[in-house]
């Protein structure tokens, strides 16, 4: 996340390959926002999924592979550059895909006793159908918070299960393959529900740490700055923990001289750290290390 925020703040330290990764993250966020906008008036459906896919692939890896459209040709999963004969898994023919996605959507709206089991099945079936030429993994993970939100299990579509799945990538693929190969739905559902539980606990711990940090600084900053604008400044840097000094001065709704003084005080007290010094017309880039380290889950700044 730190690299993404540095990129948005105009810090150009990333390699070209890393910038491609960052743009994918930004597209993921844009696609989530587009889906959230659509879900204000529509149910979670194939239409929402195709629109999110179109945004997800815009200008990044897979952009020339029919964004927003189901595949018309075969695809398969296996080692890089392998052909279909060496694939680990081959999804259904493209001609059968529209009917399969219709069945998937009907199950999406079924009333079932356990929403998490339903989500486990939906995720596995989506990945097995592999409806797009590219971006199926990214979109399949995006479906998790969208479904949880629509089902009323979370208050906003903010639940990112990717960290758990990435750390257990081999088991994740093995469990999915075991469904198709051995019909082992129970093993897959146990794995998926444990992933949701573990990720929820990690998310909750980080959220509590963020709230505790905000509460601590809400009392410290007025003493540091001796200003009525302290809490407003605090909320602004919590929303943008890597930023250009000029953006804070112009956007924090604090008088300019006061905003400049704040930045000096917060750097002096160690609340902010300078990532890139100002030079000429280029503004300094500043970071909020305490918040970023909580979000990253390790000491990064």
Image (spheres, grey):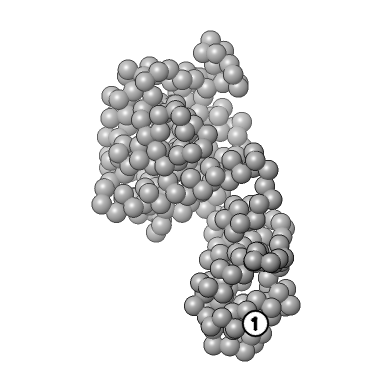
Q: Nearer the viewer, residue 178 or 34?
A: 34
Give the mark count.
1
Q: Nearer the viewer, residue 228 or 278?
A: 278
Q: Nearer the viewer, residue 103 or 32?
A: 32
Across and down, in percent, residue 24 comes to: 53, 42
Picture layout, residue 169 above or below residue 283: above
Q: Residue tagged by mark 1?
A: 261
Can residue 120 be spotted in the picture?
no
Q: Residue at x 65, y 76 (%)?
A: 263
Q: Is residue 123 left or right of residue 105?
A: right
Q: Residue at x 60, y 22 (%)?
A: 80
Across and down, in percent, residue 292 comes to: 64, 61
Across and down, in percent, residue 219 comes to: 60, 83
Q: Residue furthest front?
A: 280
Across and down, in percent, residue 25 comes to: 54, 46
Q: In the rendered image, which quarter is residue 221 located in?
A: bottom right
Label 1: which secondary element: helix
Picture layout, residue 85 above or below residue 204: above
Mark 1 crowd level (few <14, some 14–19, many ≥20, 10 Å Cα) = few
Q: Residue at x 56, y 64 (%)?
A: 240
Q: Residue at x 59, y 32 (%)?
A: 171
- For the C terminus, the quadrant is bottom right
């Amino acid at each position: 996340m730190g690299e993404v925020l540095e990129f948005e703040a105009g810090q150009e330290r990333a390699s070209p390959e890393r910038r491609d990764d960052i743009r994918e993250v930004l597209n993921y966020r844009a696609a989530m926002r587009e889906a959230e906008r659509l879900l204000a008036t529509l149910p979670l459906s194939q239409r929402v999924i195709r629109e999110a896919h179109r945004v997800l692939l815009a200008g990044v890896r897979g952009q020339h592979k029919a964004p927003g459209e189901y595949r018309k040709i075969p695809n398969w999963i296996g080692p890089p550059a392998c052909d279909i004969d060496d694939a680990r898994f081959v999804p259904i023919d493209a001609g059968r895909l529209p009917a399969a996605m219709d069945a998937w959507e009907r199950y999406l709206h079924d009333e079932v006793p356990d929403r998490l089991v339903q989500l486990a099945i939906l995720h596995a079936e989506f990945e097995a159908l592999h409806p797009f030429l590219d971006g199926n993994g990214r979109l399949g993970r995006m479906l998790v918070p969208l479904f949880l939100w629509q089902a009323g299990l979370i208050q906003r579509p903010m639940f990112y299960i990717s960290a758990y799945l990435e750390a257990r990538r081999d088991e994740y693929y093995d469990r999915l393959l075991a469904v198709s190969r051995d019909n082992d739905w129970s093993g897959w559902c146990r794995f998926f529900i444990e992933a949701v539980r573990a990720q929820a606990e990690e998310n909750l711990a980080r959220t509590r740490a963020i709230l505790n940090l905000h509460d601590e600084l809400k009392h410290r900053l007025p003493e540091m700055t001796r200003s009525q604008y302290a809490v407003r400044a605090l909320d602004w840097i919590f929303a943008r923990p890597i930023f250009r000094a000029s953006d804070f001065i112009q956007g924090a709704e604090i008088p300019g001289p006061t905003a400049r003084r704040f930045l000096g005080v917060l750097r002096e007290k160690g609340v902010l750290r300078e990532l890139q010094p100002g030079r000429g017309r280029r503004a300094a880039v500043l970071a909020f290390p305490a918040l970023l380290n909580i979000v990253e889950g390790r000491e990064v700044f």
